[in-house]
Each structure stands twice: as C-alpha cells, then as structure tokens.
Image: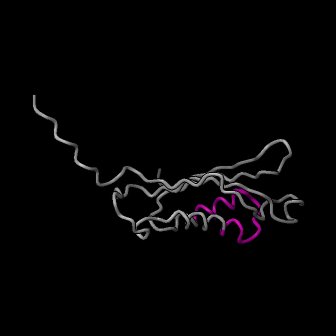
Amino acid sequence: MRPQAAAAPQRHNNRQVIHLQGLRFRANLGVLDFERTGPQPIQVDAEVNLGALPVVARDADIGHVLDYRRVRTAIIDECTAEHTDLVEALLGKLCNRLMSLPGVVGVRLKLTKLEIFPDCEVAISTELGAW
C-alpha cells in the first residue's frame, strides 16, 4: 500500500462572503403619514459576495481584503442619506452602493421595518449579482 501524500494547500476558496446580521438603526422610510414625521427603526441583514479569493493564511494587511467596516458604513450612509418612500427603492439604491465596493460580485439584502405594525415586523429581501 502506498502512503498517501498530504493534500496540497488550497490557494483559493470557492467563495468568500461578508455577513452583517441584525444591523439596527433609524431611517426616514415609508409612504404613510406617520412614517414621514421622522425616522423609524429598521434592521438590515446583508451578504456581500466577494467571489473566489486567495486563501489568507498569515497576512495581516487589512488593505488586502474588503474591510467589513466599509460595508457597514455604506449601508448606514445609504439608508440615512434622505427620505425614501419605498423599501424596494431603498434596497435598489443599497444594492448598487454595495456592488460598487471593490471586489463585490453579488449582494443579498433583507430590510426589516421593526415597528410598522404592533403585532409583526415586515421585511423585504432582494439579491443582485453573482451567487
């Protein structure tokens, strides 16, 4: 019986995804009269697909990866920049903003209005790009 050779280290992963879950803040969003009086609490869950990337083993240079702080900041900035009537419109703007970040090939988003109804939350999700 021949001894098995050790598997060669993989140089690239199949896909790398940044996940932000439960990002909560207030945004001016909605068409109802009470939604136009001020910001309401929302939650954004995001998956940002970076595609196949070299496997990072020992490198500590943040400049070699998409810093997830940039993803978080982009989400908050886009959602709070101005009043948006429709969740669908805000999701579209947010998808385009995240797709413009370096290396992003796909985006999945879920935006939840946390206090629109007293008995439930309402969420809409979308995806854009490669998965």
> From what the image shows, is residue 11 above or below residue 60?
above
Q: Is residue 28 visible?
A: yes
Q: Is 18 colored magenta in this rendering?
A: no
Residue found at x 48% / y 55%: 49
Instruction: Locate residue 89: give its quadrant.
Output: bottom right
Residue found at x 61% / y 52%: 21
Q: Is 84 colored magenta in this rendering?
A: yes
Report whether 6 appears left or right of 121: left
Question: Residue 21 versus residue 46: which sits nearer the camera?
Answer: 21
Q: Is residue 129 visible?
A: no
Where residue 108 appears, as percent x and y from the top left, is: 57, 53
The majority secondary structure of the magenta stretch comes to helix
Q: How is the image coloured?
A: one colour
Where residue 102 appears, as percent x and y from the top left, is: 46, 68
Report whether 23 appears left or right of 108: right
Residue found at x 77% / y 51%: 114
Report whether 118 appears left or right of 104: right
Instruction: Locate residue 81: give its quadrant.
Output: bottom right
The region drawn magenta spans 77-96
Where residue 24 appears, as percent x and y from the top left, is: 70, 57
> From what the image shows, is residue 1 above or below residue 81?
above
> From what the image shows, is residue 104 above or below residue 131?
below
Question: Residue 36 versus residue 39: which sits nearer the camera?
Answer: 39
Residue found at x 36% / y 58%: 56
Where residue 73 appears, as percent x and y from the top left, is: 61, 67
For the N terminus, which image quadrant? top left
Q: How many labels sit on residues? A: 0
Q: Which residue is most to the left?
A: 1
